[in-house]
Image: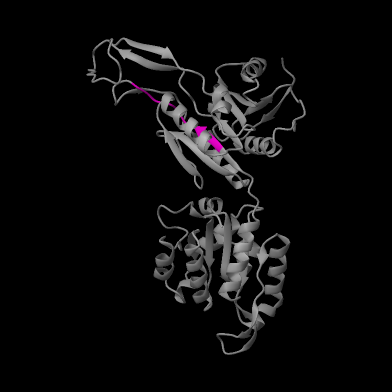
Amino acid sequence: MSRSKILFFLSGSVAAYKAAHVVSRLVQAGHEVQCVATESALRFVGAATFEGLTGKKVLIDLWESGHAMDHIHLSRWADLGVVCPASANTLAKLALGLASDMVSATLLAWPKGKPLMIFPAMNAEMLASDPVQSHLRVLRERGFLIGESEEGFLACGEVGAGRLMEPDEILRRIQEKLHSRPALGSILITSGATRESLDGIRFITNQSTGQTGAELSEALRDLGWSVTCLHGQGARTPKGVRLLSYTSHADLESRLREELRNSRYSAVIHCAAVSDYTVVSINGVRPDERIKMSSGENLTVELKPTSKILPRLKSFSSNPDLIVIGFKLTLNAESDELLRAAHRILDANVDAVVANDWNQVRADRSRHPGVVCQKGGARDFTTVSELARLLDSLIREGWKRVFLPEKEFT
């Protein structure tokens, strides 16, 4: 079984001791497990137990400094969520959309379509009550997977339904779900800016922050892809994806050759802002030699053009069906001019181009307007989320034509 990221939720029940066994076995199987617990859960089994099993801090406090956004980030990071044991209180919060603690807030932020398994444990009368049964029906209708409680001796001394499913059966169901999870494939995304060194401290770069590449990485991860983000130094990095870094144009090209040769990617989305020039010399001295630069001096910097990476990506790849998507950023371009600039990049080696103008992008960073172009047609988008869904559709279809030509251009 391949390694998966599992977010394990614990709520208040004496059955939490069984959860420790499940967590231990998942870690032994090679999975990465992060536990999130209610305060009442840790009255039955201490945080130290789960920290010892996972090697990670148990997250409890929604308001802890440095963790205010964990309920969002973790719900995106995980491949699978497991609520075990699920108390009546936690079931009610999940069904009603309440978010009063770390567990309920993270469950409320859970992405639609991502698997969440729920294993209830409580007294038989509590389980049979109308409110609990109503909440379970709501959760089933939402697509969550409910593990039926077992009958037997309960912690309260009574006999009946409500006993938490045995750990081995919980493990079997988790493993079954992990095996059945569709594997869409792998996408390589480049982001951020290259840095062309002058003297080891100073360098030539551009304004790219890596924000678009990071948001695309997270959005495509949530859509089911295995994502690797190859980012520039200092660029924003996404969460929940594999990260690699580069510095210069030459370093970026080297890393791309290595990745595409050694791993079979379905697609490359090349949105890194790559320098058009690299440094030949400063005052006649090569930049890789010992240089002393002092403020107040005139400098003569000789530059030479760099080679274009985008049209050569398919030649780097071990996958003959690799889909290559590039980016084109213009400055002060009208709509028709933007489309023509994108069209000039499209050829047999570049399947699509995402084009936008810097003036539109920087005007409101909460939006990201642009157009996705392929030969014969194009589609507008206004946010990175919309862009991610367009690219997801294209890659899933194996580059069948899924656009209607909303825009024609030549």
The residue positioned 72% from the left and 76% from the top of the image is 130
**Place of residue 361 in the rendered image (x, y in percent of width and height, measured from the top left):** 56, 27
| Residue 300 lies within the magenta run | no
Residue 10 visible = yes
Range shown magenta: 188-197
| Image vertical order of residue 70 relative to residue 82, above or below | above
For the rendered model, the colour scheme is: one colour
**Place of residue 7 in the rendered image (x, y in percent of width and height, measured from the top left):** 53, 59
The residue positioned 48% from the left and 35% from the top of the image is 230
As rendered, which of 80 and 226 lies closer to the eye?
Answer: 226
Q: Is residue 77 left or right of residue 380?
A: left
| Image vertical order of residue 278 relative to residue 231, above or below | above
Q: In this view, does 102 lie to the left or right of 408?
A: left
The residue positioned 59% from the left and 54% from the top of the image is 109
**Place of residue 205 in the rendered image (x, y in percent of width and height, measured from the top left):** 41, 23
Magenta highlight: main SS: strand
| Residue 191 lies within the magenta run | yes
